[in-house]
Amino acid sequence: MLSSALCFFFLYSTFFQLTANALRLPTTQRRRLAPRTTSAVHFNYVNTLAAGGTSVGLRNDKDLIYMANVSIGGTSFGVQLDTGSSDLWIQPGNVTIPGVTPTTLVQNITYGIGWASGSVATASVEFAGYTIPAQALLNVQLGDNPVLSYGASGILGLGFTSLSQIDGAVNRSVGLPNGNAWGRSFLWNCFAQNPSQPNYMTFALQRSTDPNASVKEGVFTIGEVDPAYSTVLNTNPIPTWPRSDPKRWTVLLAAYETGTSTPQTPHFPPPSVVFTAPTGTAVILLDSGTSYTYAPSSMVTDIYGNVPGAYYSPAQGEWIVPCDAQVYVSFWIGGEKFDFHPLDVVAPSMTQSGTCIGTFIPQNLAAGSSDFDIIAGDVFLRNVYSLFDFGDFQSSSSSIMGNPYVKLYSTTNLTAASIDFRAIRGGNAPLLESTNSSLALGSLNSTPSSSDIITMFERYSIYVPVVLAVLGLNTLVLIIMIIINIMNCRRRRARRRARAQQAAAAEVASVGVGSHIIHSDPEINRTYASSMDKEMSLRQVASISTAT
């Protein structure tokens, strides 16, 4: 009984120690893939600004679309700048683009809303001070895309070349000139021209209703930073997710805050549908080609559900919110807090005069169906100066870039934004105040909601396989040690019996065959040997426990 108790105590102590240590292990990660989703927005005609130098002036209409001029074959076309895609396509209409070299490749580029179909071609493209003599593009003959109703002629994708549908079509082709390199995206070709230069682009998007904006429309740069926002270079880099070889400009959201006043307690985002995302985070796509922000319905309800007079319209698929309702939202990304201007959280409806809508649109994605949870569009990007770094080339002769990252510099002061909101929307909303700009994970919601509790259980449940694996290994080691000790006990017992038999034989020989010797009874000998075995086993268990 004593030996059994010691064994049980030893096993229990081992389990407790292993469990405690296992809870300090890193979080497991999951992964999933999906096609891109774009926003459903209403476009009006937008004029474009001419490009000059390596910075490009942008213009927007009703804070819905940001455009610039691109020169193709010497002809200027207005295009939307889109970080959510990677292809350049133009629908020239009745204009003939000089110097275009067609190919036999036909490609259809599809989006969540809209499509463009035509032939893959090459032409000289000039933009932001860069000239690519033979840039691959789609010369569109047929298309149905919302940007066309703005007077735009196409889209310039600013994502990774791995997302390019044109590059994919070229790579799949056979027998075309220059192998498969000529299908790469415009930005990849720009960076390849001078591998020693920084491989980044920046955005400064302004809202058309901002009375204090230093730049009324916006600025885009390649390889340089707008002097007004040079502080962005001193901010911490935010790695993409995944960290290496991402297809999109996706980063991790650690928490968010919302309410009708400040301060608010940070909340974990809803559980991610991205298998690789660390538990307790959400994956955000930073998409300049989307006007609003698309998020899980539970998160959107958290933002607008407690606003007086706000309600969800199933017919419109969006929240109807009083125009003078000031709603506070902030995102925690890369350990820093980025506040939304209240004007970017509630916006005038494009279809119903005098009505406003929530710019966070609910969408529910199935697990494994997408590689992001949230699309953060222009309503977020207007509140930061954003730098998108593709990663530097590993050498001057290499085509391999390092890991990409993002830098974000907050441009929204909540108190000033609250004053602007009152001046434009009216009402007597309380002034918002900026709070801490850095996040410690321990400060997250000390009184968690039910969704936070579920997330917490999900977070710790991932350790169970690790604990079981470690316990299984240690149990195996323990079994091996027990077997070894049993074998040692048997060897010792065999040696004792051999010595006893030798002694008995000698004694029998000296007293005669008919004499009775003490403990010569077999039953007495078995009892004695059993007691000795128990004592030895007890010593062995005690020695194992002491060694452990």
Image: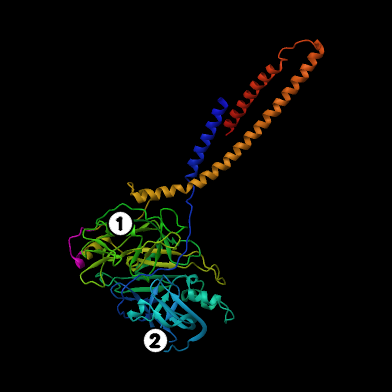
Question: In the displayed structure, does residue 339 sit left or right of residue 421?
Answer: right
Q: Secondary structure at mark 2?
A: loop
| 384 sits left or right of 86 in the view | left
Residue 48 in view of the camera? no
What is the three-letter code of the residue carrying label 2?
A: Gly
Residue 212 can be seen in this image: yes
Q: Quadrant of the N terminus?
A: top right
* Residue under the image location 57 percent in, 81 percent down: 176
Residue 297 on image: x %, y %: 34, 60
Residue wearing tag 2: 93
Amino acid type of disc 1? Asp
Q: Quick check: is 154 in the magenta stretch?
A: no
Q: Main secondary structure of the magenta part?
A: loop
Q: Is residue 423 magenta?
A: yes
Q: Which residues are magenta?
A: 422-431
Question: Which comes before the other along the chain, label 1 or label 2?
Answer: 2
Q: Residue 63: horizontal and vertical position, in percent? A: 30, 72
Q: Vertical placement of 55 versus 413: above or below?
A: below
Which residue lies at the image location 52% right of the left edge and 74% below the top edge?
168
- Judged from the image, the secondary structure of the residue bearing numbered disc 1 is helix
Locate residue 167, reporting x and y percent.
51, 75
Q: Residues within 10 Å of mark 1 (few under 14, many from 20)?
A: few
226 lies left or right of 86: left
Q: Which residue is mark 1?
A: 302
| 182 with respect to 376 (left or right) | right
The answer to whether 179 is drawn above or below residue 160 in the figure is below
**Viewer-closest of 390 and 101:** 101
